[in-house]
Amino acid sequence: MILAWMIIILMAGGLICWLLARWNKEVVKWVALLAVLLDLILACSIWWQHGGVPTSGANAWLIDYKAAWVPTYGISFHMAADGLSLVMLLLTYFLGTLSVLCSWNEVKGRIGFYYFNLLFTLTGISGVFVALDLFLFYFFWEVMLVPMFFLIAIWGDSNRRYAAYKFFIFTQAGGLLMLISILALYFIASAQNGAFSFDYTDLLGTTMQASTARWIMLGFLLAFVIKLPMVPFHNWLPDAHSEAPTAGSLILAGLLLKTGAYGIIRFVLPLFPQVTADVAWWAMLLGVVGIIYGALLAFAQTDIKRLIAYTSVSHMGFVLVGIFAFREMAMQGVVMQMVTHGISTGALFVLAGMLKERLHTRDIGRMGGLWTSMPAMGGVAMLFTMASLGLPFLGNFIAEFLILMGSFGSNVVITVLATLGLVFSALYSLRLLQKVFLGQPSSHISLPDLSMREMLIMASLTIAIVLLGLYPQPVMNLVSPVIKGMEKSVSFEMNNHQSVISIP
Amino acid sequence: MNNLLALIPALPLAGFLILSLTGRHLPKSIIAGIGAGSVSAAALITIFIGMQFLQSPPTGNAYTQTLWQWMQTENFSAGIDLRMDALTLVFVFIITFVGALIHIYSTAFMRHDRDYARFFASMNLFVCSMLLLVMADNLVLMYLGWEGVGLCSFLLIGFWYETPANVAAANKAFYITRIGDTAMAIGLFLLFRELGTLNIPEIMTQAPAHFQPGASNVTWIALLLLAGGMGKSAQLPLQTWLPDAMAGPSPVSALIHAATMVTAGVYLIARMHVVFQLSPVAMAATAAIGAITLFVAGCSAMAQTDIKRILAYSTISQIGYMFLALGVGAWSAGIFHFFTHAFFKALLFLAAGAVIESLHHEHNIFRMGGLKDRMPVVFWTFLAGAAALAALPLISAGFYSKDQILWYAWSAQNGNPMLWLVAIAGALITAFYTTRLMIVVFWGDMKTHIGERPGKAMTIPLMILAVLSIVAGFIEWPHNLVHLSLFSDLVQRYLPETLLQEGHPPEIIFQLVAAAVTLLGVYAGYVLYYKNTSILEQWKASPAMLSLRNFFYKGWGFDDLYDTVFVRPFYFLTRINKSDVFDLLNKGIATTSQRLNEWFSFSQNGSLRWYVVGVLIGIIFVLGLQIWG
């Protein structure tokens, strides 16, 4: 029930924001903040209750809540959270809180509708992370999309219409494919079980011909890899990220992309274990293409938000490689990457937003030498660019290290190519730093350094990324039963290090 | 004793945290106190632990301390665990002790700088990372330190970030070392796949049983680790970043780019000696790279005019000697050269910094001159350092360490006369360019007016290092002269003994040749730059000599080569695809739909005549199908 409460709180908060805005604009912000904070506390309390006890074996679900919704068609309000969901929920509410905070002064117009959309996007995202009924999942998948469309189209930058439509069409195309796949799976399973059900647990054991399974799986997979995004379906991302308001970019990069990865882990692998293994090689290849291609593109950009957006393409390539390596270690790395990329790239987008507020431009050609007037911001930017290039003692390193070391046992050539991504990430990260903060100050107008509110945002992000880098074990402990559970359905080769393979 | 280990890196870390969080609001005296104090305290603790270590060796010849579990999955675990054995002790001593002297020097050297706190914060973070690198019990933690020192090197090379050239130098250093680091990471993956562990003691014990000597997998691992070491230690072909790295303040060059970080590659190879010993190919590669590097960099040093670039090339060259020693299996000789080199090269950089500061930031040695009598302290200390660099027989520390390497380059198990020949040529070159540096800077006419002279905080560290540059060699004598081998006794608690070949010429001949060559180099420098400078004038007139000089001056053209082969194509590639070729596909779909929409909406124009024509065409089409179909 606590999961349902989380959703309800956000929805109610969103509605209240919209209604209240007529009377008092100041209160709206506080309502929004309160709603997300409340959810953050709820998520923490779940962690507090269940985090210490590693659930073993068969039932990895920490919380399982099910209520009938449309029983005739087997649609139920089934929500459950295991360690993976919980990690993603914690990330959602953490970044959600920050997204409210970083909109505090940036958003001026139609403030009620803005927070309504913001909270509803978060609703959709948290729903996606807990829904276990495929109909419900699809519902939340769409709930996530529409308010985001408005956030970009209304509060975005100069080219916002184009970006919003592009975002909508790409995601919707994927969503429709997924809907077809869900329905196909639903009918096949119903014919086998003799009862209609959209329930994940009922659909899990469905047996199909390999060719059928492949098509259905591809429907799911396409929807998820568009969201991830995977090259060549990534073109919505740079536009959407760069045109969205700061909070929008933060949520897009920090959370929305992760729903794609989550979908693959939660649905594609367990539902279609065999046929997924068949496409693994291709998925890893496209992942590594994404790593290198995204990094090259990032290096070329002159728009700071576009640059960061392309780094996301690169980093999400690691996720794809890690998932399809089918190794426990790589999978641990994938979850870490989802969390740490959310934090580090989110932080970079917030910084880009702060820069834009001060300089009214996203063009890095017109920045430079900003460290002199804003040493605190420079320091924070340094930290997060270092996180982005995978410097140890920051969380991203743990993620990429585990992914690469895990994948190495599964595909040497692809892993070596992916490791080269570490060199390219240094190229674009340092270029960003050099263009924006180092060099000769371009103007002598002194800019205000971080305000207290901004300091609060950056400090919490900093603490999070350093903690994850030095003590990632709690997150790994939460996720490990989930991965072990998957091991049963997908043939993970666990003790891979014992196989002695000669060098290719 | 074990519990004190963590304090050594923790103190500089605390210094970093305090300075980076509150440094901007602190007065300079307190910043200096925290910055230099934390490292000095770490040095005192190290000396204390070191005394204990020497007096009563711990079980297993190592102190260990487990801090916390870093990450653990089903078949992999890494902890934040520290370990101090003989090899680590040597490195930690140099890092903290020389580090402390350099920090004390810096309190005065940087006194006018606006970003005083940022400087000491970065320096402290560097010391902490470097300590973690050498104290790590597993390779992942070592990699943390490894990347951490890279970060600090980047921060400190680009310390004066408002000059774009400094930032470019910092970036270059980071990029090139990252290439090595990436190779090293792949080496770690491979090592883990083979052994299932990255814990150093476990690797040391399991590797000999697991790997066939000379097998391809262990060769790959060793070569990849070597590539990591080549990046950090600026060995060919990854050496081009170090001369540019001189853009940083002089204490940074002394600490990071002479005494400690650039020798991380030496540490790595010595630490993983079991793996290297299993691969003759990798050992030969290490020796060859060292030999080639020491020669190439030595030649470049002869032609430089910037005092710090001369020292930078000489650092590359001296590390080449260390690689050579490791490659031929003279483990303790390599580490011994690291030990003495840290003193004399740090000294040379600090003294050079004092000269540069007094001469209003003049770097060109040909605009210095005549400083012998005007800056006596700097002169005498510089002389001590230069003597050690040139390896003046018997009276300098550099002699004792370099002589060993020269001897082993021929006589050790993997040594051969070719390696010895290159090494002895390098010794000649070293003696020559050191003499040139000394004479041009300190003799002759004064060309630049002296400003502020260095104070006590700068001269005292110089004097301590000068004494060490002379006496540090006395703890390890050549076997045929005096039976005293304190240093090799210590490090051979971890490293294997140096094995000799059968039937090599007697050691004394090598010593005499080495001494003669050194004196010849000094004499050549003396003749060319002091006694008879007209020879040099003649050379300058000859185009062949001039182009050779330019070739050396530009570091054998490596920068131009990389620029053509890598940098320009990369820029070109990224520039032409800035707007993302895949987006054309999407735009194509969008335009196609729009065109189709236009055509179809054109057909629906409300004109009855058009519709009649359309219907007629349809009828004719259907009829046609009936008739001919």
Image: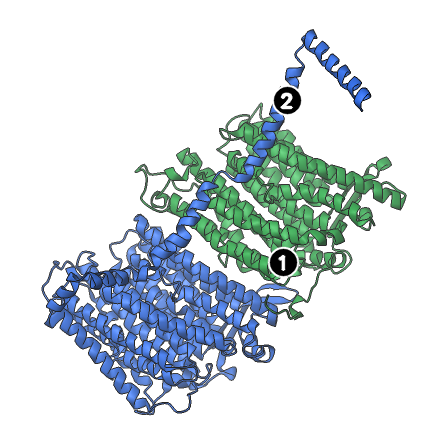
Taking B536 as reference, is A296 above or below it?
A: above
Instruction: Tell me, yes or no, if residue A28 can be seen here.
Output: no
* Front position in the image: B26 or A305: A305
Relative side of A171 to A64, left or right: left
Measured as percent of width and height from the top left, residue B478 is found at 32, 88
SS state under label 2: helix
Amino acid under disc 1: Ala
Q: Residue at x 56, y 72 (%)?
A: B216
Measured as percent of width and height from the top left, residue B137 is found at 51, 71
Query: Circle 2: is it few (<14), some (14-19), or many (20+) Cα within 10 Å?
Result: few
Measured as percent of width and height from the top left, residue A163 is found at 55, 32
* Front position in the image: A110 or B358: B358
Q: Which mark is residue A488?
A: none
Chain identifier for the blue-coloured part of the image: B
Query: Circle 1: is it few (<14), some (14-19), or many (20+) Cα within 10 Å?
Result: many
Q: Residue at x 40, y 61 (%)?
A: B125
Q: Which mark is residue B597?
A: 2
Marks 1 and 2, how far apart at CA: 47 Å
Label 2: chain letter: B
Instruction: State the residue lying farthest toward the top.
Output: B608
Measured as percent of width and height from the top left, residue B529 is found at 14, 69
Label 1: chain letter: A
Taking A116 as reference, is A89 above or below it?
A: below
Chain identifier for the green-coloured part of the image: A
Relative side of A28 to B530, left or right: right
Place residue A304 in its image quadrant. Answer: top left
Instruction: Check disc 1 and report the residue beneath it.
Output: A330
Taking B196 as reference, is A337 above or below it?
A: above
Q: Residue at x 35, y 64 (%)?
A: B256
Place residue B92 in its image quadrant. Answer: bottom left
Taking A454 as reference, is B200 above or below it?
A: below
